[in-house]
Structure formats: structure tokens, C-alpha cells
Amino acid sequence: MTEPDFFDEGDLVGVLTTQPLDRVLDYKAPEGGCWRGAFVEVPLGPRKVLGVVWGRGKGDYDRSRVRSVIRVLDVAPMREEMRSFLKRAGDYTLTPRPAMLRLATRAPGLGDPPSMQKIYRLGSTEPDRMTDARTRVLEVLRDYGGLAFTLKELAEMAGVSTGVVKGLVKQGAVLEEDRPRDLPFPTLDPDHGGKALADDQAEAAEALRASVRTGTYGTTLLRGVTGSGKTEVYLEAIAECLRQGRQALVLLPEIALTAEFLTRVEARFGAKPAEWHSGVTMTERRRIWKMVGQGGAQMVIGARSALFLPFQNLGLIVVDEEHDTSYKQEDGVLYNARDMAVLRASICGARVVLASATPSLESWTNAEAGKYDKLTLTSRFGESVLPDMKAIDMRGEKLPSDRWISGTLQRAVLERIEKGEQALLFINRRGYAPVTICRACGHQIACDHCDARMVEHRFQKRLVCHQCGESKPMPEVCPNCGAEGRMAPVGPGVERLTEEAEKLFPDARVVTLSSDLFGSARALKAQIEEIAKGGADIIIGTQLVAKGHNFPLLTLVGVIDADLGLQGSDLRAAERTFQLMRQVAGRAGRSERKGLALLQSYQPEHPVIRAILAGDEEGFWRAEAEERRQAGVPPFGRMAGIVLSSPDVQEVFDLGTEMARRSAPLRQIGAQVFGPAPAPIARIRGRHRVRLLVKADKGAPLQAALAKWVGQFKLSNQVRLSVDIDPQSFL
Ligand SMILES: [Zn+2]
Ligand SMILES: [Zn+2]
């Protein structure tokens, strides 16, 4: 029986709500009927909740007691492709439907009637008395030829108080009107400001344009070293998508990058696109959600959750820096935005562009296998070239234990500063020191709630747990042996490195870039602009600096501890180190000046370090792929991580053991279960954590088996179970 598209008043409809229930509930269609996919408000117990008409009602409930849908919301109904996307994404990540629906309705007040706001435009009468302030207001309005502004915008642009504008309203020189708050976004012009492209860019852009014109699904891996002009290339794909009258979505890994990118989009298309991320106000979120659904937003730039916006006609998804680990949601619904972008596009017939200088092994493998198209930008745009890369063998440097900048690196930095250039010292550790130890008894200060050591943040004068955020003042007295004044920092963090650099280079201007040192994205952006203009000689930075920022004067990168990422049992450790080192090194010499990257390492003969230095990317990926193929791990096999947590350590271990024992559904598909074992971080926020790993062959129906397996166990209220398909990290 096919599902009807429209339900008449009184028909039984199944409504999926955002409430954590394990089924779709029956309701009667309201007066006037409703479409399948309609967003509705329904009664649930004493409350009114948001839901979507998912299909025909089951009718397995006493009909006389079935309640009616309260009302249909005034927003575009959910499209069939979106429902299909939510279903398949939920099945893939083993996420219940209501949680998927919550992802798709992350905007407040969807059911509210359109709210109005006051706007101001030029009136026809002259004020009785002119002042400088009044003149400025009228000039702004005349300059913008009939455009209207909010009170705040107008006052700011004219540099006057809001009282001046109000005064002009009384005189009739300025008109005050009401207009709906949720307005369409300005139209983007695909032919506004195209840039001249280098030959290989032009070729790649044409290939992407042609693929967009097909109007069918396909994924392209767009590779190019830092500074090769990937952005200009995929902006041309977006232009073509806009010409086709379809919508484009660009995912960026970090909010801090958005501002710079918005400027480029505005230069290319003559107006700003919609911007969706955690820093956007609730009102703006609602506006974007509605406009995307009505076709009033042609382009969205956003964080991974933008994938769940109700696009009306999505034609292109760009995932920039596709290898970035922040695309994997690590709490709540565990999904990888890159994979979900591909899924969504395949459902709605859109193109995907995965852009990266150092692609993930998954994408590299898919491109090698011909599943993805491959475009590679070889030359760097403009004059710049990739920096030279060299290792500094730390075994020969003989540094005292409280210093980390080797003599070789120090000399290289001095040389650059003397030439008026900039140097970046990179360390991927926030805070002052990763460990605080008592010199009397050897006690290390750990978090009370987590299995983690507290990190000293001298700037904030506190010890901070990087797992749970708990902090406490630095103790005067050892909490273990009571010795006074014997607590000492061990190892370097970005703040301690800054201290060392300030001592070594007393005349240099040293700036620290670490995400926790900035109150807001705006403050960070201002600092970055200041550096780009030459406002610093030495930049001390964490991972934050590895991403996309452009410092034209920067010609030297010193990596303080290139070995840091190589430790640990994570199967992606090598891949991540390779990507991070390549990216950091890519910061040097992005303009005409030739760059140099120096990697301090105690094991310069390590294959990963050697591959980085040789710049032999293909060789690295091939070797890494072969190792994973041998081990049968992703992307050549399938994995799932199961984490059980509870305040009661015995309870989680008992449950873990029980799960390992009763694993018949997994064994039936040939999957293996490893564990239970304490998770690498065995306690977070007072909850003990136990982990099981499931490994299966590539073609095995893993999700179905997992669902069956997990479904056998009844969990107590205090136990939490999370399933992570294709885990990115093993914490
Ligand atoms: Zn002690
Ligand atoms: Zn903690």
C-alpha cells in the first residue's frame, strides 16, 4: 500500500516527535488536513511537543482515545529526501529517530507566528532644524538609495545616538515601519567577482563546474597543498551551482575560520551567505532554518550540524579540510559530517567536494579505488612554494630538562627576526605544563573526577582538567605528603614555551595563540589580523594555528615536539601526525618568501617523520593503507567502539563481561569482540568507563548485528551506553 501524500481531517497519522520515545505515535489529522512531512504540534500527556507527520498511523491503539494534532506549523513540510536522510543516518549511527529529528530542528520558535521588527527609511519631509548628527543620518539613508535599516544599524552607521533617529521620525524626515524579522538573505551573484585563476586551477574549476551541471550525485576529492588556491576553485563550483538555481552548503571545521571565509565569499558573490554555527543567535538560527526551507538562502556556511538544515534544493556540499577530526561529533549523536555529507548528497542528487591538503586515508582510498573523482592542484598559487623541511635531532642538542627550544632552532629564529620576518613555534599542548609533581614525594596532581592529570594554566593561575573542565587553584602544600612549596611543573605547554621564548629573544615581540586564551572568536580574529600585518615577531601556537590562517611574513616554523602525536595506540596516530605536521609546515612561506620548517624530534628515523620530511605523500598513504589492510581495520574493515559508563565501576565491568559473553548476533556475521577493558580515559566526570571494540569484515551488516546484540541487555538507570561506528579516536 503506498503512502498518501495528504491526510484529510480525522485520518490517522503517525507523528514522530522529538521526545525520547521508541516509536511513532498515532494522532488524528487536524481540521483542514495535513501533508505528509508537515511539522506539527501534538499533545503528549499534559504537554505540547514538536513533531513531523511521518506517514499513515498504525491504528493499533483504541481509536476513541487517539488525540488530534493541535496545529500544523507555518513552515515548509519536511521533504521526502530529508526523511530518508534522517532514517539512513540514524540507521548508520544507531541513533534513535527522535534524536535524529532533534538534529533537524535545532532552531527555536519554529512554530511561532512570524515576528516583526521596526525598520527605518528615508521620509519625504525636511526636519525643521538641521544638526550635524541629523545630516549624517539622512546622508546614510540617501547613500543607500531607499534601503531600510534597524534602529541600531542606522545609528551605528551614522555615528549618532538612537535618540537622533527617533527625533527625525517625529519630524517625518525618517519613516518607521514594521517588517517580518525572518527575511530572505541577499541574492548572491555568481558572476560578480571571479578571480583570474592559474592554469591548473582553471582546469580543476572547469571539471567541477561540469560535474555540477550533471545535476547528479558524485564526490570529488580536491587535493592541493596549502596555498594552492583550493578555495578559489571550489567557489567556481558554487557559482555554477547557484547558476543552476540550486543551493550550496560549505562546511568548515572551525568557527574561527568563518570570518575570513565570509569575506572571500562576499568578494566573489557580492553579498554574504547565511552563517550557521554555535556562535549564531537564536533568532538568526530560526531565520536561516526557515529561509533554507523556503529557498530564501542560496548558500550556507556552517559547522557540521548545518547538514541537517531543511534545504529545498541542495546542489552542492563542500567539506573544507575534510580530514579534520572536528567533523566527527564526539558527544551526543556520533556521526562523521564528511560521511553524512556524502550520504545526504547521494539521496538528493547533489555533488560533494572534499577539499584538503592532506586528505583522510578514507577519502584517499575511495579516490584510489575510483569511487571518488580526483582533482589535484600541483603548483602553489602565486610565487610561493612549499617550505623546505628538516629534522633537528634532539639527541644531539643536549638541552637542560626545563628547556625545549634547541640551539639550532634558536639560531634559525634569530636569523628570521633580523630580516623582519616572522617565526612560528608550534606545540600542540594548551596551558603551562601538562604535569604538576611534588618534588618531595613524586605525587602528581590528578583530577578528582577523571582519570587525568591536571594541567597548569599559569595565565589563569589554576590547574585545569582537560577532560571535564574542572579547575582548582595551585596548591601550596602537597596534598599527598604535606610538603610545602615543593610543587613543580613538568613538561612544556604553550604558555611555558612563551616564557622560554621571551627569555631567549628579549627584544622580540612574542604572541601566544591558543584557543583558551581568547574570550571570543572576534578577539581571536583581531589578534590574527594583527599578526598578519606584522604585529609580532614570534608566534607561539597550538593546533589553532595549523588551520587556514594566512601570515604572509611567516617564513619559519619550528615544531617543538614532532614526536608527540606518534605515541599512543590509536590507529590514526600516524595519519594525524602526518597531516598536522604537513599543515603546520605549510604555514611558512605562503607568499613570495621561501619558507623553512624545522621539526625537533628524538626519533628522526621514524617512518612517519621521514615521510613528512621527504614530502612523499603518496608513499606515506600507500604504506599506511597497506598496514591497515593487513590489520583489517578501517577503511578496509569495519569497527565500532562501545563505551559503557557508570558511577559504579563494578557494574560497568559486569555488564561489559556479560556483553562480551553473549555476543552471538555479532559472531553470526563473523565479527569479533575485544574487551571489556578500561577505556584509555578510564574515568570522566566521576563516571567509570569501560570499552569494547567490535571488528568486522568490510561487507558485513554491522549495524543490524550491533542493534540486535545491544538490544539483548537491560541497562540500569545509571549506566550509559554509546556506540561509535567508525571511531575516530579511541578515548
Ligand atoms: Zn608530596
Ligand atoms: Zn576532570
Image (cartoon, helix red, strand yellow):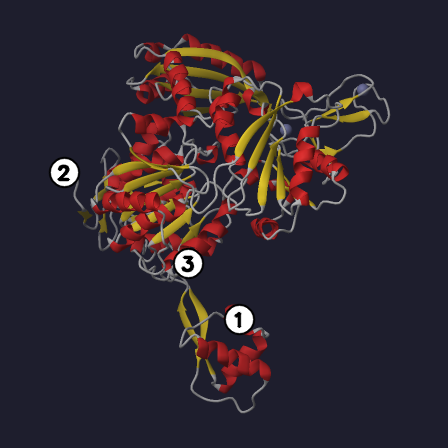
What's under tag 1, amino acid-wise?
A: Met
Residue linked to disc 3: 267
Label 3 neighbourhood size at 10 Å, few (<14), some (14-19), many (20+)? some
Image position of 469 (left or right of 31) = right
Label 2 neighbourhood size at 10 Å, few (<14), some (14-19), many (20+)? few
Name of the residue lying farthest toward the bottom: 128
Q: Are marks 2 and 1 in contact (CB under 8 Å)?
A: no
Q: Which mark is residue 636?
A: none
Q: In terms of image quarters, where does ligand 2 lie?
A: top right
- Element type at marker 1? helix
What's under tag 3, amino acid-wise?
A: Ala
Marks 1/3: CA–CA distance: 21 Å
Place of residue 393 in the rendered image (x, y in percent of width and height, measured from the top left): 63, 21
- Would residue 358 be visible to someone looking at this image? yes
* In-front residue for pair 154/713: 154
Image position of 629 (left or right of 570) = left
Q: N-terminal of the two: label 2 or label 3?
A: 2
Residue linked to disc 2: 2
Residue 265 location, quadrant: bottom left
Residue 511 location, quadrant: top right
Q: Which mark is residue 157?
A: 1
* In-front residue for pair 121/56: 121
Q: Is residue 254 above or below residue 168?
A: above
